[in-house]
Image (tube, rainbow, N blue to C red):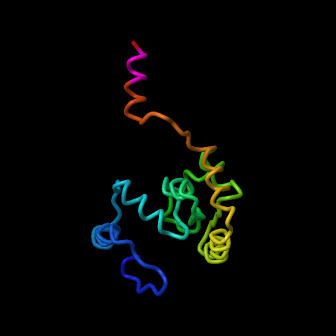
């Protein structure tokens, strides 16, 4: 990705070091600062990703999303293994989620993301869809854990 000479795509500044390290050292798991993620998701038009929490995070930001499952890629064993698990399958089959199972489908379905971006009601629809997968809480996670442990006594 980092080595491509993109005409219409700009690499977000906080991701350049990460992509450079993948190019030189190969893939490694990373945990980006969520404030950076929020900023990026606030500015993008849409998100294309393999099965990843970034899809639900983008959807929670009201962005059109495409779940790309490169099933033809023999090295994509992780996606081939987990894509059919019930929680992933339910997410993939939501009408608000564009699903592409190969590179050809990805290209064919790109326009659908841009149509959804222009739909003034789509953002509300996809945020509503997220409520099936993510619960809202009044208290922060660390406070809920403490409360749970205190009530466990």
Q: Magenta region, mostly helix, strand or loop?
A: helix
Q: Which residues are magenta?
A: 147-152
Instruction: Look at the image and say whether residue 148 sits in the magenta stretch.
Output: yes
Residue at 52 percent across and 61 percent down: it is 50
Q: Nearer the viewer, residue 6 or 131?
A: 131
Q: Quadrant of residue 144?
A: top left
The N terminus sits in image quarter: bottom left
Residue furthest out toward the right: 95
Q: Nearer the viewer, residue 151 or 140?
A: 140
Q: Is residue 1 visible?
A: yes
The C terminus sits in image quarter: top left
> Is the residue 9 above or below the residue 39 in the image?
below
Residue at 65 percent across and 64 percent down: it is 98
Q: Is residue 78 left or right of residue 88?
A: left
Q: Position of residue 56 (x, y in %)?
A: 54, 53
> Is the residue 124 above or below the residue 146 in the image?
below
Q: Is residue 111 left or right of residue 17?
A: right
Q: Is residue 47 left or right of residue 110?
A: left
Q: Position of residue 29 (x, y in %)?
A: 35, 56
Instruction: Look at the image and say whether residue 140 sits in the magenta stretch.
Output: no
Residue at 67 percent across and 66 percent down: it is 120
């Amino acid at each position: 990705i980092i080595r491509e000479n993109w005409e219409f795509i700009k690499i977000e500044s906080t991701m350049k070091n990460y992509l450079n390290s993948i190019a030189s050292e190969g893939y490694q798991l990373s945990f980006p600062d969520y404030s950076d993620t929020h900023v990026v998701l606030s500015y993008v038009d849409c998100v294309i990703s393999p099965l990843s929490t970034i899809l639900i995070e983008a959807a929670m930001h009201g962005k059109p999303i495409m779940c790309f499952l490169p099933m033809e890629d023999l090295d994509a064993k992780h996606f081939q293994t987990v894509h059919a698990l019930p929680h992933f399958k339910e997410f993939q089959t939501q009408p608000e989620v564009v699903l592409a199972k190969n590179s050809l489908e990805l290209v064919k379905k790109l326009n659908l993301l841009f149509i959804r971006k222009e739909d003034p009601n789509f953002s509300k629809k996809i945020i509503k869809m997220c409520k099936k997968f993510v619960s809202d809480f009044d208290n922060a996670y660390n406070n809920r854990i403490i409360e749970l442990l205190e009530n466990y006594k």
